[in-house]
Image (tube, helix red, strand yellow):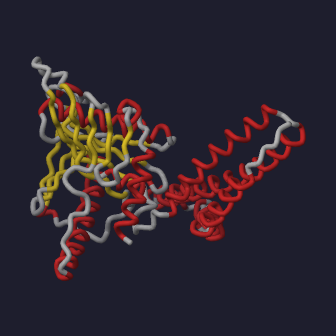
Amino acid sequence: MIELDLSDRIGALRQTFSDIRAVVGVDRLERQIAELNEQAGAPDLWDDPENAQKVTSALSHRQSELARIMSVERRLDDLEVLVQLANEAEDEDSATEAKQELASLEQTIGDLEIQTLLDGEYDERGAVVTIRSGAGGDDATDFAEMLMRMYLRWAEKHKYPVKVLDTSYAEGAGIKSATFEIDAPYAFGTLSVEAGTHRLARISPFGSADKRQTSFAAVEVIPVMEEAQEVEVPEGDIRVDVFRSSGPGGKSVNTTDSAVRITHIPTGIVVSMQNEKSQIQNRAVAMRVLQTRLMLLQREEEAAKKKELAGTITASWGDQMRSYFLYGQQLVKDLRTGYEVGNPAVVFDGELDGFISAGIRWRKREVD
């Protein structure tokens, strides 16, 4: 006789989900969708392509968020019916299906709960991620490429659209740097805890002495800003260089000087773009990213000054936020949260949600 009792776990999930619904504000979300639908239906919408893109993107994001909430609500209702049917019919298959669905819902609602912790000013925006190789020669450039693939695989697993904006290939292995955009709700808030210095320790595949090699790569995450009007950049403060887009080994991938590199002279910030087809498009995207970086830099300086005046100067992240060990113990460990995984291969294949969730909870505790 089957006596499947999942009522306590389902009840706990319903309570958590109710709290999530309240924080997300489903009624507010529905009003926003109605307003955006009205704007999207305007006959002159595409007279201003930039604004049209902004409206349609915002509409898509909010519809996706609402659909996710409503889907979970339906699944909870269906789960209770499935448990009842399993008990009434004494059906082992239905009981197994109910347990699997409960485990899946616990994961999904856990992910939604993490999202409610993302309440920063820009957390709900998409993300622009830049990876740069550091010390370590070929191992470092190879490591940078491994990290890029890791984040692209993470985005692919979540079905998030990704656009590679720029890639600078190393002469040997891997990449010197890469910049890509992830266009998904809360991508910035989610991935911002990945920013910092990553360290790789392994037996180098590029040396002949089988010695352990330590190499480093930096990950930068900034929000996607549709318009970065808060920071004006005088033409005299920038140097613009144009060049041909290149592929692995330095080979040109087109025959025109369409790639753009903008250097902000006062700060030394450099932004390169080569993904778009025209020089004008690449320059526009590069300027948007530069303005965003300058705006965030300005805010960081203001925050640091406030901390200095208050007499509390503390490092937020530390020089190394995560270590990847590919020899001996085979381990990936976050040095802030203590979260670790004993299978680096799955981490490099995009299984990052555990690290990200732990990082978001850690950051919330630090802020509070």
Give the percent coordinates (x, y) of residue 192: 35, 55
Q: Is residue 173 above or below residue 84?
A: above
The answer to whether any part of residue 256 appears in the image is no
* Point 26% across, 44% down: residue: 131
Give 167 or 105, whichever is nearer the viewer: 105
* Point 52% across, 59% down: residue: 58
Q: Quadrant of the N terminus?
A: top right
Give 331 or 116, whichever is nearer the viewer: 331
Which residue in the rendered view is the most extreme toward the right? 88
Q: How many marks?
A: 0
Q: Quadrant of the C terminus?
A: bottom left
* Point 38% across, 60% down: residue: 362
Q: Is residue 203 above or below residue 76?
A: above
- Residue 309 in which image quadrant: bottom left
- Residue 345 in which image quadrant: top left
The answer to whether any part of residue 40 appears in the image is yes
Give the percent coordinates (x, y) of residue 245: 23, 35
Which residue in the rendered view is the most extreme toward the top? 208
Could you tell whether 169 is left or right of 152 in the image?
A: left
Could you tell whether 6 is left or right of 64 in the image?
A: right
Which residue in the rendered view is the most extreme toward the front? 1
Give 77 or 70, whichever is nearer the viewer: 77
Q: Is residue 283 above or below residue 316?
A: above
Give the percent coordinates (x, y) of residue 220: 27, 51
Give 28 or 50, whichever is nearer the viewer: 28
Give the percent coordinates (x, y) of residue 132: 21, 43
Q: Is residue 283 above or below residue 232?
A: above
